[in-house]
Image (cartoon, rainbow, N blue to C red):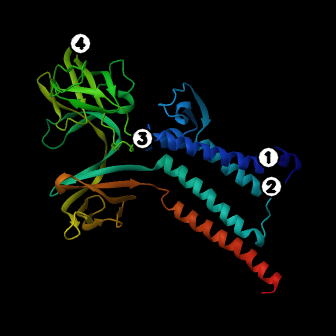
Amino acid sequence: MNPNVKKTFQPLASLQLTVVLFAMAMFLIFAGTLAQVHQGIWTVMRLYFRSFVVWIDLQLFVPINIAEIPGRFPFPGGFVIGTLMMINLIAAHSMRFKLTSKRAGILILHMGIVLLLVGELITAVFAQEGNMTIDEGSYANYTEDIRQAELAVIDASSPDYDQVVVIPESILVDYGDPIRDSRLPFDVTVIEWMPNSRLFGPMGAPPGLKPRATAGTGKGVVAQRIARATGVDGQNVDAPSAYIKLSHEGQSLGTWLVSLYLDDAQRVTVGGKSYKLSLRFKRDYKPYTMHLIDFRHDKFVGTQKPRNFSSLIRLVDPVNREDRQVLIYMNNPLRYGGETFYQSAFKEGDTGTILQVVRNPGWLLPYISCTLVSVGMLLHFGLNLTKFVRKVGL
């Protein structure tokens, strides 16, 4: 290697940088673990480990019942630390390590670590995850992302199909100005967005909270903003709500309450035409259909302990000419079309199934990485053990 180039890249290959990066990674994991008490695991993953910079509150490190500590400080996120670790590892091999049989184990081991970092990057950028809920005897052709919501405006006037226009959560949270689009039959102005909420009847609402909706099924209902779900408080999923104002050509259509808790879509009439309005989890429609033939929730005899959850599914995909039955149960997922279907949960009363649907193009990389790390360690320590045995004459 050219001496000038070597001098330039020497700091990137230093062992001191390796130690600093490992210390930073440990601190980030520690802070992220503490943050999960107040924020959901997916929020922490996004803010701490799948970001370039994270702002860490000082209050994380001191219980609030002891003292209130204001302020926060920036810290490198997981993307930055992971990238620097990979650069440091590659630079160290390029400048210090030689390709010899004695170093084969270390090279394979480090190759596995690099592959693990690459796999996490692919997962963070490209992986998708959702739930498919199917009633027994019915079907579904979409998944729901329980981490994001959307406001759907549905034109169901055609007997053959529904025309749906959705406003994603990323637009709803940035409220203030009216939301206008030529595909929307009315303008939408978000008065208040609640990332997580609970609903009350008019008689059970906390003091100071009164019904604000003037139209729709939420007229007698009160929505209250609550803290985001963390998973440690018994609630794993946020249930957002919002107060919105609808208008058409300058004429007010009233104030509406939309919420994940309101299962049935609300009817909005504009110019003599009726539309459905619904706040729901973000949907991802599929080119295939899953029919639930039978759901089983078996228990051990004489107990309430679950023995087995299984879903007998009929998979229908006209494009790929698929029409077959498959049984999905615990530890036996279905892999189809680049997606994996896991038996995740079931509806109350065993009336249906909930499948977790995951698309992760990098799902094989962790397995390959762990195999390489194991082979590298065995090879490296095996060579040293063999050398030691020969030296002592055993």
Amino acid, disc 3:
Gly
Residue, disc 2: 95
Residue with the mark numbered 1: 9
As helix, strand or loop, the secondary structure at mark 3 comes to: loop
Would you say the residues marked 1 and 2 are in contact, meaning their CB atoms lie under 8 Å apart? yes
Does the image show residue 180? no
Q: Which mark is residue 250?
A: 4
- Residue 280 placement: quadrant: top left
Q: Position of residue 370 (x, y in %)?
A: 57, 64
Residue 116: horizontal and vertical position, in percent?
Answer: 58, 57
**Neighbourhood count class around disc 2 (C-alpha, 10 Å): few under 14, some 14–19, many 20 upward:** some
Position of residue 111 in the picture relative to residue 284 (left or right): right
Residue occupying the point 33% across, 30% down? 226
- Looking at the rendered image, the disc whose residue lies closer to the viewer, 3 or 4, is 3
x and y, in percent, of residue 241 in the image: 28, 30
Q: Quote the CA–CA distance across marks 1 and 3.
A: 40 Å
Name the foreground residue: 364 vs 65. Answer: 65
What is the crowding at mark 4: few (fewer than 14 residues within 10 Å), some, or many (at least 20)? few
- The residue sitting at the bottom extreme is 394
SS state under label 4: loop
Residue 40 numbered tag: 3
> Horizontal and vertical percent for residue 340?
37, 59
